[in-house]
Image (cartoon, coloured by chain):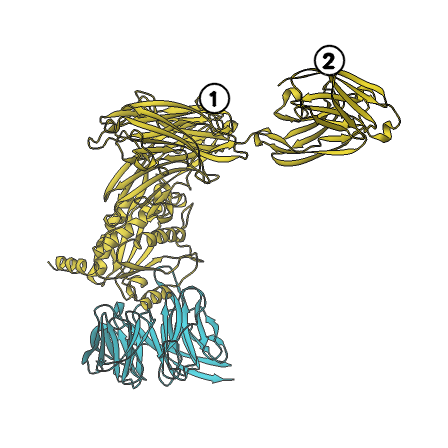
Amino acid sequence: MRRLVFVSILFLYSSLYAWTICLDPGHGGSDPGAYGSYYTEKEANLDVGLKAQEFILQIPNVTRVGMTRSTDVSVSLEARVNYANSNGFDRFISIHHNAYNGTVQGTETYCYTYGSSYSFNLRDSTHRELVAAYGYNDRGAKTENFYVLRYTNMPAILGEASFIDYNRTYNESWRFRYNWYAHVERQAYAYARGLAKHLGLYYPSFVCHTNYPDSVNANTNFTVRDSFYVAPHQAPADVVFEIKSYASGTVLYQERVSNLSAGTWIKTFGLNPPISLPDSGRDYLVYFVTYVVPAGGNWNNKYTYVSTRLLPTKVKSTGGVQDTSYIVYKSYPAQVYACSTFTVQESLYIAPSQAPTDLIFEIKHRQSGNVLYSERVSNLSSGYWIKTFGLNPTISLPDSGYDYQVYFLSVLAPPGGGWSNRYTYKSTYSDPTTVRTNPQVDTSYVVFKSYPGTLIGDSAFTVVCSLYVASSQAPADLVFEVKDRNTGEILSSKRIASLSAGYVNLSISDTIPDQGVDKTIYFVGILTPPGGGWSNRYTYGSTYTNPSTLLANSRISYLSYPDTVFFGSVFSVVDTVYVASFQAPADLIVEVKEHSSGITLRSKRYSNLSAGSYRIEFVDTVNYVSLTDTLIHFLSTLVPPGGGWSQRYTYVSTYADPTLVVRTPSVDEGKPLLASDVQIYIRGKELIVKTNKPAENLTLIVHDVMGREVERVEINGEFEKRTYLNVSKGVYFYRLLQANRTVTKGKIVFVD
Amino acid sequence: MVFNLLLLSYLFKLSNFYILVDVKLQSELILSGPKYEGIYLFDVKANSVKKLSEGNAYKLALSPARDRIVYRDYNKVKLLHFDGTERVVAEQPEKVGFPVWVDDTLIAYTYNGEILIVDTLGNLKHSISGVRSYYIDYSPKAKMFAFQEDDQIYLIDWSGNKKKISVEGTCFAPIFSPDGFYVAYSEISKGIYLYNLNLNENFYVSKGSNPCFSSDGSLIAFNISQDDGHNITASEIYVYSVSGKIANKITNTKGISEIRPIFSPDGKRIYFCTPEGQVGYLNFIKFLR
């Protein structure tokens, strides 16, 4: 009865009170305590004490856990006791291990012979847990007059959880040295659990490997079984299991069990999906880590953990080097509700010979093959990856009014590649996911199934949209737009009208005018009521988050070139050039050509122009000895580096408006004008006379077929003379005279 | 330089297990039972032990006039007279710190992050915040409190100005010298340190435990013990000269493990107890050479 009253009072008090505990790892420094062949008592005491501190701090209402030592130092019994007493701790727990002659094993726990009922209760509670932790021989809960039990000013116990020198059927010190199956944590947790039970408080969460291999063959499935306890005050909790490289610490495999309620659990990892570690050509080590975290938490806010790093597992090579990428679906839903979000997680291995690699993830309608969702992860380097799809952006599948099936398809391909040049893929086609309908929901959707990442101005391209038009929204129009991502300007727009209910894949071809510069663009598909637009849309799909690039074409134009040049003079032709990014580098060839024959009189190449705009001035001297014509024209051509006319990207020419070459008087002074120096022709009602050198005393006489003079033109020192002839249509004859010498004569025909 | 002459240690014949807690007068000791349970008055001359209280004797405080004791009874501060009468001076909802005398009329104790100074009727006279500790000491000469907090030692004055004074490590149990110039405290693995308030400096005294100042503040008695991890196997008493900064071993008794030495008020005797619950003393002579 007294015990029951004591427990009741303590329990009532515990939940309100802030408890402080003193832990005392025995021995230390120059005092090793007992010896085991692999570990000393002082080392085991400290390992257990430090872990017990972590656990005890997770007991609710425990606000402080002091340690008489937290490193390997010598501390006298008096100092331990004085430290505990002066700090006013509520409980004192001394941690020791026993030794005899290596043949004895068992658990003992002590309190002071004349201690209070609290001391006895703490002793009994802790002793039960220590015995259960290891399952060793129960040597009893005892009393003794140890100094720390007698001189402490609070209820105190001393635990001897095992004989560290035991080495008959197994080696106890080896178990501590390598923390075999969380040997340290199990004892530490027992102290925490015993204390919590004594105080009537919740004890913390705990995890322990119950079965794991010490070696596995590469590429062979294996499992690891863990047991864990989720404390009520730490529930719901997640448990995360990882396989890590011993050399680098890289996570090779990870699996999370989420939202576990309070209680005891056993979980086998590696059943679905299976665990199989690749063959690297030689043996290597891995270790397992399992940790308990708040729901959704991570390593940084873990409650507790266990690791096999001191006893890693060997992965044995079977002779083959794994140089093949693979994909494994770690988790995906068997069933989802339409319009609800979900995630799919997969683990990958990218072989060095196939890196970098793109990962393409698609969700496809199992019956029609339509792509309902697509995401690409680009340029993955070699190694192990874990990827979760559906976090950002989220995945949500539409409601079609009835249940339907989808499957997940993941493809590893070269950068920018796809299904056709894939390295490997994984699919859940044989194990599809059911999308359950919500009868109240029936929504359309638009998804861009394929679209060009790069397109060229003035060139045609095709975009494929996967649509679903809900029955309640049919018929609907699809408005397809191409927009400038920076300004929002609509560069192109098309409407496909009157789409009926159901699934459809639409191929939309379009051409966007060359914008003069490269631009970032994106595509938008808007489902609207017939004739509707953005403001009354049902839904839309967009490639805004994964835009495309519209490339401008190369172009050349003449900024300036001469209409007339003097023979022997210097002139310049100025080109403005734009070299497209996809045609850079390029050469610009500027040529001077004889107009009538097309013979190249001069040529200059501007090499390796990089992408961008240029102003190029071509300067030359009119000293073309082979020139017989009076006219020349210019030709500018953009070609690949070292290329020529046949490979041209683009060109520009002044052929339609050639340049006149004038022979100067100093060159031809004194020489009579020849017929070849003159051109006479009609343009409309104008009679045009051109000479290639200024000539004196020229007279042009025009007469009709009757010989009657209709016009007389005097030309003195001009290169060109234009005369308007007010004559009726018909045939006329002209004669050009220089000092009564006929230079040339001919016939002209006037037409109205 | 101080040279000490060892005289024989005497052990009292007591039938029970006692811990020496304090020295009331030259020939009257305050003892407690195991785990500091019970407060007893031992008359050395009469060799009689009288139980004063069932209370807990750890760090009880003898008044400056040495006529009363205050001690902590979990959430209460109790005033105990040597005729055995006692009463509650202060009471709080939860555990309070160990009380000390400020003077013969005022008692200080800690509660809920504060030092509360009350009169012997329990009326609150002053409070100083910023003290999370159960263990404090007061110096009327220095007009300061010393306390331990988060394994470090601090000083705080009546205005609440607080200063850390200890070395790095796990420090505890500060005590003022009678003249208020020093604070002695322990570091758990290294031993005893002495802090000089005027110089603002720490001096390492020695490894060992249980430092106790003589009434004139010139000496510190302490003990250095050996143990097997479970029990003390040997211990001897040392005396440290504060001015000379040197410690001398003053016992060398193989059969007796002297611990917790306390000077008598006149400084001529050092009382001690043993791990086995015995109480004894040695006569102490101080020579100057």
Disc nearer the start of the sequence (1/2): 1
State which chain is coloured yellow: A
In this rendering, is residue B283 above or below A59? below
Residue assigned mark 1: A421
Screen quadrant of the C terminus of chain A: top right
Which residue, given by chain and number where applicable, does mark 2 sit on?
Answer: A706
Task: Between residue A59 and residue B213, name the one nearer to us.
Answer: A59
Q: Quadrant of the N terminus of chain A?
A: bottom left
Whether residue A414 can be seen here = yes
Q: Chain of mark 1?
A: A
A144 displayed left or right of A6: right
Q: Nearer the viewer, mark 1 or mark 2?
A: 2
SS for callout 2: loop
Determine whether label 1 and label 2 are within 8 Å by CB: no
Please, which chain is the residue tagged with disc 2 on? Answer: A
- The type of residue carrying mark 2 is Met
Residue A721 versus residue A385: which sits nearer the camera? Answer: A721
Q: Position of residue B102 (x, y in %)?
A: 31, 82
Which color has been applied to chain B in this rendered view? cyan
Q: Quadrant of residue B190?
A: bottom left
Which residue reaches farthest right? A670
Q: Is the same chain shared between marks 1 and 2?
A: yes
Q: How many marks?
A: 2
- Residue drawn at x 85%, y 21% is A740
| Residue situated in front as seen by the camera: A212 or A468 | A468
Q: Position of residue B119 (x, y in %)?
A: 25, 82
Indicate the secondary structure of the residue bearing disc 1.
helix
Numbered tag placed on residue B72 in the rendering: none
Q: Amino acid at mark 1?
A: Asn
- The percent position of residue A396, horizontal first and vertical second, equals 30, 34
Q: Is A215 located above or below residue B219 in the figure?
A: above
